[in-house]
Image (cartoon, coloured by chain):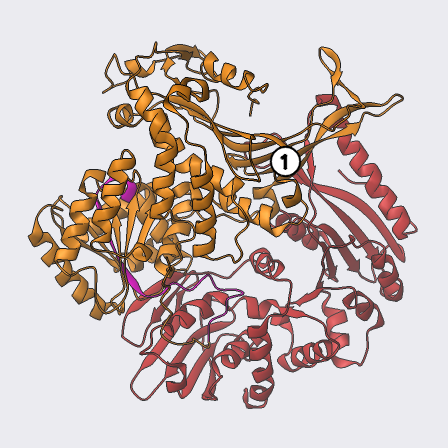
Chain colours: A red, B orange
Amino acid sequence: MSSAVIFPAQPENILKGLGKLWTSLGQEEKQQGKPTVLRACAMTLIVATDEPDSGFAASQTISELMHAHPARGIVLAVSPDAEKSLEARVLAQCWKPFGKAQQICCEQIEITARPQSWPNVGPTLVGLTVADLPVIFWCRHKGALRQAATKEEHAGLEAITSLATKIVIDAHDMPASDTVTLIERWQARGRVIADLEWTRLTPWREPLAHLFDVCECKLSDFHSIDIEYTDERPSMAALYLAGWLSLYRPKVSFRRVGGYLPGVHRVTLHSDSKTIDFARTGPDSAVLHSASGRECTYNFGEPAVTALMTEELALMGVDPAFNAAFARVRELLPDTP
Amino acid sequence: MSVVVQPLPEVNPLQDPLRFSRRVPPCAIVIFGASGDLSKRKLLPSLYRLFYERRISPSFAVVGSSRTPMSDDEFRHRMADSVSKFLEDAPFDKEVWDSFAQCLFYVPGDLTNPDSYDDLRKKLDEIEKSHQTAGNVLFYLSTQPSHYAEAILELGAHGLNRGNGWRRVIIEKPFGHDLLSARKLNDEIHKVFLESDVYRIDHYLGKETVQNILAFRFGNGIFEPLWNRRYVDNVQITAAESIGVEGRGGYYQEAGALRDMIQNHLSQVMATVAMEPPTIFDATNVRDERAKLLRAVRVVKSEDVPKYAVAGQYGPAKVGGEDLPGFRQEPSVNPQAQTDTYAAVTFFIDNWRWADVPFYIRTGKRLPKRVTDIAIQFKAPPLGLFTQETKGGLRAARPNLLVLRIQPEEGISLRFLSKSPGSGMRVRPVSMDFNYGSSFGERTPTAYETLLVDAMSGDPTLYTRQDMVEASWQIVQPILDVWANTKFDFPNYAAGTWGPKASDEMLARQGHVWRIP
């Protein structure tokens, strides 16, 4: 269920549109005489995109995320192809859990804008965030990110980041040096940042970390680390992994190999007498060889972006492990191929 | 009593508690009764799932033991079949299973045969080296309850209760069949294990939504001030099953609903709902408060049992076009059985918070639907200003109701009154709903997954302690004694109904009615 186009896209008009939407959803409830719709909201999720589909892919992802993280979703599609300078429509994302009589509905606002309207976006969004709940800004707008990383300021983006409890980016397609500059700049302004390239590492990091629960296995004994990657250059994921494992300043080397999926392919830790090796053995599996020679197979394929976001939306505050790894990435950056 | 939680060997600099699941230390789990139903349906699927989700340490092993002769590989094959069949909400991944299966071992043995324990010890010594389990062992007694004491004494006699690491034991309910036998069992257990190493499992306490009661009560400031005799009129706890005894007739006719549900699961749920806030959220403090609450429950006098407790047994009926047998017509059930397939009890908690507030608990088989919930019925406002529209005309508005739904639609509903649109001041009840599944969306761990991780991690918060078990027997024992000497006119409710009329009358005497869940 969605509304007609709202223009001018002023917060009050958009909120009025949302009000009408809920009233119409309530009609069914009135007819049936029992609750049929449950309105759910735990945060405001703003997604900025410059994908050529006017935010369709972002809307789809939001509707999948709603099941785990009900939110007022705001898709901000900024593109030169937009029909008007700034327009909006509102809709409800509803689903009925299996076997349940009641629909669960989250509201969504879709804003399309031309790039010259960036300065107007921030003031519009200020009036649209849900009071007293966190605001997550997921920036999929590559053009804006590139500009923010290479130039000093992107006024439109800065206005949105200042609203956000947490900013999420995906540095997979960004040059590592740009990513580092951008994150450093935002961190200096006190923003909480998450990078989905770091999130992609959780299935690698968790089994590796568990090995060091056994007292015979000490991280400080491992003096060198080899990381194999499949991209043209070491991705941020490879750098984060190296940063995370570099607490005791081991020698880190990167090597490009062919593999099953983009990103990290293998990580090997060497001590004088032991080796730990964790490598992809297929597109859906990886095998960990522990220092004692035991072998353990894990199932993980290329994680869907929805799964990565679900993990990130569950963490609202500062992520100390990410911050520590990121701090060391800066030091490693000059040594990367 | 103190709980010893052994620390992990060193501070692991790579741990990331924000993103990783809770650390589970290396250990071996020995399952006695490994070829039984519980192992196949719950334990192995839960352990596999934990492995799949990378929640178990790679230094981990399972040793199954039962009388059936089998090799390690045969055990692995059998468990692969069971896990793929009984895994809930999760995929069965062959490659992951192959890796998990390398952690599975089997030692055939009879619990009554001392030689079996020597074989077990040899196997555990091997595994400690090959799988680096650090000598930590968790014994899981998934056997006939009559073997608990013997198995534990043999573990002690063979020195299996001590080693290089910690040794713990999980015991399934029933913990005794009455107060006396529960005390005796506890005495036998304590000859071998310290109370801090004994984990009595009550899977109800492992349910996410039961744990959520604690979060709801003690994480929010707005409800606790209302949570007392001044504002609460009565509390109704319902655990209804639509199925019958499903082939467990032989067991069930010895147990009955009061023993099977109220003595353990539901009394623990009541304790969770009614306990005082712990000063610290840790195992000792939470369990102290639960135990204190159970000790405050009024023990009914024998002569008052008919007034405060109702037994029922279902008879045959046609439900939805299907002929359902009565309990006495179920396989392996004595046609004259006096078993309670329904039990309803009124409890009073004699403390300052709850004095004179009735806690009604009912449970039964072959009731209209499967539902477990707790309804907190608040008192009406002191002055009834408004009327409510009902099918039968206008009547005084119904008071607030808070429902904590345990299953199947886990969540919390608060019913309050709202003005009906239009002229005139008429009100109607509306419901503010929190739906657990839709708010968090993600898969919730099963009770066994939660409880196994807790036991491996040394966290007994959700396990019942000796004093809790004895206190809960204490409150049902007079009822059991009276019922044992009563000849009931069974059956007294038809399958597919909400239980015997006497149960409604029990509430009517207090001026209350059962709500329909």
Q: Is mark 1 on a helix, strand or loop?
A: strand
Say which residue appears at 45% left-offset and 45% top-offset.
B292
Q: Relative to the observer, which residue lies in front, B191 or A56?
A: B191
The vertical placement of B321 against A323, above or below, is: above
The magenta stretch is B14-39
What residue do we see at 42% from left, 10% from top?
B318
Q: Which of B449 and A54 is in front in this view?
A: B449
Q: Which residue in the structure is indicated by mark 1? A: B413
Where does the image place residue A336, in percent across and percent down from the top left? 55, 87
- Residue B294 image-quadrant placement: top left
- Identity of the amino acid at label 1? Ser
The answer to whether residue B242 shows anywhere in this view is no
Is residue A242 visible in this depiction of the protein? yes
Displayed quadrant of residue B254: top left
- Where is residue A243? Give x, y as percent: 53, 81
Disc 1 is attached to a residue of which chain? B
Residue at the right extreme, as displayed: A8
Does A17 sit above or below residue A100? below
A147 to the left or right of B452:
right
- Residue B61 percent across, percent down from the top left: 26, 60
Q: Where is residue A28 in the image (x, y as percent from the top left)?
A: 74, 27
Q: Is residue A76 above or below residue A290?
A: above
Looking at the picture, tell me which residue is in the foreground, A277 or A27.
A27
B368 in magenta: no
